[in-house]
Amino acid sequence: MLHDVIVVGGSYSGMAAALQLVRARKKVLVIDAGTRRNRFAHEAHGFLTQDGSDPAAIAAAGRKQLEAYPTLSWQDGTAISASGHADAFTIETSDGARHEGRRILIATGVSDTLPQIPGLSERWGKHVFHCPYCHGYELNRGDVGVIATSPLSQHQAELLTEWGRTTFFLNGAFEPSAEEYAHLSRRGLAIETIAIERIEGGADVRLADGRLLPFAGLFTAPHCTPSTPLAETLGCELETTPFGTQIKTDMKQTSVPGAFACGDVAHVPHSISLAVADGALAGAMVHRSLVF
């Protein structure tokens, strides 16, 4: 069966794109591996009408609404390769099946490379976050820790002062200049130069000198990369952003004609709201490419 569009990735951006396409009565196949980036979080925030909702419930409701459209097909599985060209793309999944489509939309999301600190990854999405707009309010103006991953972390640390008294852990990621130290101090940041040994309790930081510093929550900036090599195998151009690597697009089309990308894998910054908006735009752009 030749689908009008194959959407690889059935999370928020992929479903938002698929919704635009099925409402244009296009035959859409969604292939979803079922590994949402925010699967570790219990609540979603900053998404109008869904503030405080379970992210899994939002995703489930989106799928249920999509499946009400007769031109929508959904397959749970992992896409492992993409080949072809506009009007003749092929996606192969891990079960050996091959699916053909006139257009493909990559919405696979990203993988987060976190600081290698014992106890941090287990608390990701629960006590350790990346987005203050998504999780800062719930800390109730408590003490906040920011763990540096690069010089750009200074901006994250400065921003977090809006949500609580903030300690900036350099943790060997970089050494601020004298001017930068002075600027950070004027912003009210406490700067900690001792290395972090591990994260304990909820969001308590154990330092190499034995001190234990308690926090309401911790923030860090992970290095993001596409969660699968699908775009690279197809020949799509990638680009570097302050957040990591993403697929380069122009009005959501990649460097490969007929192949599009949206969501965290092709757009910064990252949140559910922005992923849905980016997906809706991508769906419209894919549809237009089929018409004009």
Image (tube, grey):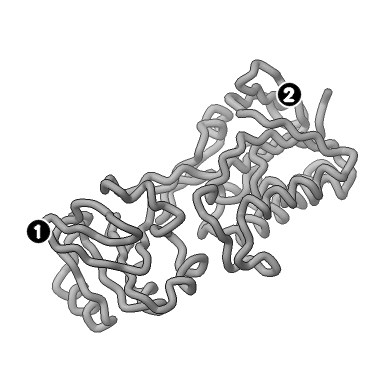
Label 2: which secondary element: strand
Residue 43, position as x, y percentages in the image: 56, 60
Location of the N terminus by quadrant is: top right
Q: What residue type is labelled 2?
A: His
Q: In this view, does 118 lie to the left or right of 21?
A: left
Tell which residue pokes out farthest to the front in this image: 201
Mark 2, residue position: 99
Q: In this view, does 72 lie above or below 195?
A: above
**Residue 239 drawn above or below residue 269:** above
Can residue 103 be seen here? The reply is no
Mark 1 residue type:
Asp
- Is residue 165 rendered to the left or right of residue 135? left
Q: Can residue 175 be seen in this view?
A: yes
SS category of the residue bearing label 1: loop
Q: In which quarter of the image is residue 35?
A: top right
User: Could you tell me which residue is drawn at 32 percent across and 74 percent down?
Assistant: 143
Q: Horizontal and vertical percent for residue 265?
A: 54, 46
Residue at 64 percent of width and 29 percent of height: 77
Q: Nearer the viewer, residue 5 or 258?
A: 5
| Disc ID at residue 209 | 1
Between 237 and 8, the one lying in front of the other is: 8
Estimate the x, y position of residue 292 in percent, counting from the top left.
83, 45
Please tell me whether residue 170 is drawn above or below residue 98 in the rendered image. Answer: below
Query: Foreground: 49 or 239?
Result: 49
